[in-house]
Image: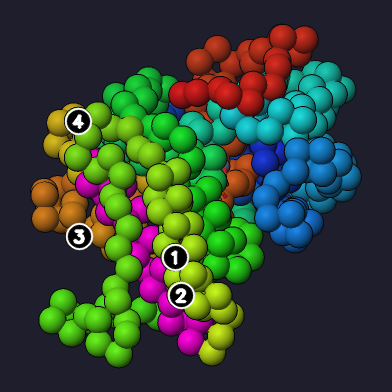
């Protein structure tokens, strides 16, 4: 039997505040393939943006420009390759000034090396990111075929990050239908903003999740004892007939609750008992944000007769979300396949760009005209 050709891919991701480059080798087709990482580097700008409580496009652009040449040298050296068979680069969605840095860099090298350039939708990367996992420890192992997880179509993808909250149905790889999305803030963005309101650093998701664990609500008959009143936030759009989400009302509700608490005690978020109230806010906010996600995901699973649920994006790291989805899927149907991405695949990374890029490359093995590729900040699946 003829051996399948192995393609070496250089992938580049610069859509937000992570500069990421990898060299990956893949072979086979979408239903039977191998994935081996030769080198994978990520430089996060989080500490630089932390001061501002969010990501600043001009600063992100400058930092990507500084990082890419150094990272390229590193991955070429580590992977011991002279040049890849093709380059995959994120062209949207994201911050356009940041996306352009990756695109221009990729374009220059595609020209120098005379190899195809494949533009990749960042969200397709997140969608596919739990298709692959590591076999043993949780860190990505180099020079070893990684585990390809079992999937069955149709797939439902729940994409939850700092910029997106979407439900997408996939009949096969490359054939996507977005069935719902947030009408305002993304769920990760709401975590970040609520974290800021209670004095936690950016990114706020992991901080809120940690704090929420410290709160153990009293059962209803005991509530109100010792002056502790359980806080309640709404579950926005939970029972709306569509698959859309809204997180800005929930965020405002947290803001008003804090304002009312401060009227009673201006130092409530600073004094010695402040951790208790902060934990309570974090706990109820997380419950509310996640409950809506789980409820709508489960409804979509039933309506579209979904066989596999793939979760992607930074918020996929949230343990409460993972537990609730696992429980609900089991309850609904034992046979539903459910995958969450491993840490290295969940936050922004270039491994998922190599993966999505490979399936796109297979369509014509040519890539695109170097003069036609453009950043698209609002690109959609
Ligand atoms: O996918 P990602 O790395 O970047 C993009 O937004 O594309 O996602 C980052 C988001 C941030 O909003 C961060 O607060 C959130 O994911 N996040 C979490 C958790 N870990 C990261 N949100 C809730 N719980 C977590 N454990
Ligand atoms: Zn992302």
- Rounded to the nearest angstrom, the CA distance separating label 4 from label 1 is 33 Å
> Upstream in the sequence, badge 3 or badge 1?
1
Going by the image, does 337 lie left or right of 54? left
Which residue lies under the disc numbered 4? 241
Circle 4: element type:
loop
Question: What kind of colouring is applied to the model shown?
Answer: rainbow
Q: Nearer the viewer, mark 3 or mark 2?
A: 2
Circle 1: element type:
helix
Q: Nearer the viewer, mark 4 or mark 3?
A: 4
Q: Quadrant of the N terminus?
A: top left
- Rounded to the nearest angstrom, the CA distance separating label 2 from label 4 is 39 Å
Q: Residue at x 58, y 24 (%)?
A: 378
Circle 2: element type:
helix
Q: Within 10 angstroms of label 1, few (less than 14), some, or many (20 or more) residues?
A: few
Which residue lies under the disc numbered 2? 264
Q: Residue at x 33, y 33 (%)?
A: 244
- Rounded to the nearest angstrom, the CA distance separating label 1 from label 2 is 7 Å
Which residue lies under the disc numbered 3? 327
Q: Nearer the viewer, residue 300 or 102?
A: 300
Which residue lies under the disc numbered 1? 260
Circle 3: element type:
helix
- Say which quarter of the image contains residue 270: bottom right
> Upstream in the sequence, badge 2 or badge 4?
4
> Upstream in the sequence, badge 4 or badge 3?
4
Q: Nearer the viewer, residue 120 or 245?
A: 245
Q: Residue at x 25, y 81 (%)?
A: 224
Q: Write down the region rendered in magenta.
A: 273-297
């Amino acid at each position: 039997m003829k051996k399948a050709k192995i393609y070496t891919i250089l992938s580049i991701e610069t859509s937000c505040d992570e500069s990421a480059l990898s060299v990956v080798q893949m072979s086979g087709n979408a239903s039977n393939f191998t994935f081996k990482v030769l080198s994978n580097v990520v430089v996060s700008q989080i500490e630089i943006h932390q001061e501002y409580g969010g990501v600043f496009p001009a600063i992100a652009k400058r930092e990507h420009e500084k990082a890419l040449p150094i990272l390229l040298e590193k991955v070429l050296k580590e992977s011991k390759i002279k040049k890849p068979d093709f380059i995959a680069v994120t062209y949207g969605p994201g911050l356009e000034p940041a996306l352009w840095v990756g695109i221009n860099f990729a374009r220059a090298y595609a020209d120098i090396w005379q190899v195809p350039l494949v533009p990749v939708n960042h969200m397709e990367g997140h969608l596919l990111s739990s298709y692959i996992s590591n076999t043993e420890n949780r860190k990505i192992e180099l020079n070893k075929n990684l585990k390809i997880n079992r999937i069955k179509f149709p797939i439902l993808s729940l994409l939850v990050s700092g910029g997106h909250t979407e439900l997408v149905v996939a009949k096969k790889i490359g054939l996507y239908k977005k069935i719902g999305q947030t009408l305002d803030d993304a769920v990760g963005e709401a975590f970040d903003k609520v974290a800021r309101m209670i004095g936690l650093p950016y990114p706020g998701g992991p901080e809120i999740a940690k704090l929420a664990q410290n709160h153990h609500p009293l059962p209803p008959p005991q509530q109100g004892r010792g002056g502790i009143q359980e806080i309640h936030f709404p579950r926005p759009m939970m029972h709306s007939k569509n698959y859309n989400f809204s997180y800005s009302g929930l965020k405002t509700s947290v803001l008003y609750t804090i304002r009312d608490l401060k009227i009673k005690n201006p130092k409530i978020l600073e004094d010695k008992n402040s951790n208790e109230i902060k934990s309570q806010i974090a706990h109820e906010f997380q419950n509310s944000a996640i409950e809506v996600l789980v409820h709508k995901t489960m409804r979509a699973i039933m309506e579209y007769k979904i066989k596999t649920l793939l979760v992607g994006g930074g918020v996929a790291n949230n343990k409460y979300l993972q537990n609730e989805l696992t429980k609900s899927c089991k309850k609904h149907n034992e046979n539903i396949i459910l995958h969450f991405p491993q840490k290295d695949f969940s936050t922004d990374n270039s491994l998922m760009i190599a993966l999505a890029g490979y399936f796109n490359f297979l369509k014509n093995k040519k890539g695109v005209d170097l003069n036609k590729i453009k950043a698209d900040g609002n690109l959609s699946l």
